[in-house]
Amino acid sequence: MITVKNLTKKYPGGVTALDDVSFEVNKGDICGYVGTNGAGKSTTIKILTGVLEFDKGNVMINDINVKSNAFEVKEIIGYVPENANLFNSLSVREFLEFTGTIRNIEKKKLERRISNFLELFECKDIIDTSIGKISKGNKQKILITSALLHDPEVIFFDEPINGLDANSIFIFHDLVSFLLSRSRTVFYCSHLLDTVEKISSKIILIDNGKIKIDMNTSDLKKTENFSSLENIFRDLRSDQKSKKYPYENLFD
């Protein structure tokens, strides 16, 4: 479970990234967290994973306080960041074994899980290849694998399908469904509104550091005039920008 109360984060220069944000994500939910660039999405997810300090508020992951027990929180979460720097000089095997060792996974269990994940993502043939020599899509598969090896209770995804081909995206979403069947909590941050709408049980829309929508997906779809999450997003942006760009002048 994720509990956020009155969360505020300001950056140098007076920029307020998060302004008194509060929400809850229950155990076994997949929460789609959406917003435009600069809305506060990545700031939120970095705070929830203990990567970034915050100015005010309270953040709990499975009843553990993130600020006072950051290490304990990191033991029970998995995190796939939007941009990650992997150890390019290591082979896939070396990197995943290193990750599993840090997570205190027993050696035989770790070897079994590495093999299972690489088989799932259909990339067992790259296990002894240097990470710096594999494709962007395969790097993303390795990043996802490293985040899930220890079977975390709460999982944070920040644009997790970047670089994946269509088949790998299907595999990833089947994997997410499997995680939910095991009562894992998933916090899914993405710009892909159609995907978020399809897979999420809860939608949170943040804009300019404030929560605009916080509803179960089923309830949101029952609201008057609902057609799609994308159209809600378009309406929100239209309200803020009354003047539309004159596209007919674009190539003058």
Image (cartoon, grey):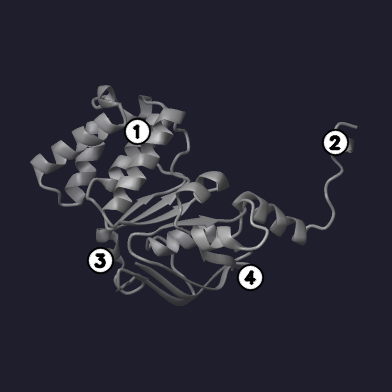
Identify which amino acid the numbered label 4 is placed on. Gly
Q: CB under 8 Å between callouts 4 and 1?
A: no
Near mark 2 (Cα within 10 A), the count class, few <14, some 14-19 or many ≥20, is few
Identify which amino acid the numbered label 3 is placed on. Glu
**Mark number for residue 155?**
none
**Mark number for residue 72?**
3
- Horizontal relation, residue 163 to residue 88: left or right: right
Q: Earlier in the sequence, mark 4 or mark 3?
A: 4
Q: CB under 8 Å between callouts 1 and 3?
A: no
**Mark number for residue 14?**
4
- Horizontal relation, residue 29 to residue 128: left or right: right
- Horizontal relation, residue 77 to residue 150: left or right: right
Report, in whole angstroms, how far the alpha carbon at label 2 lies from the one at label 3: 53 Å
Check disc 2 and report the residue beneath it.
Answer: 250
Report, in whole angstroms, how far the alpha carbon at label 1 lies from the one at label 3: 28 Å
Check disc 1 and report the residue beneath it.
Answer: 88
Near mark 4 (Cα within 10 A), the count class, few <14, some 14-19 or many ≥20, is few
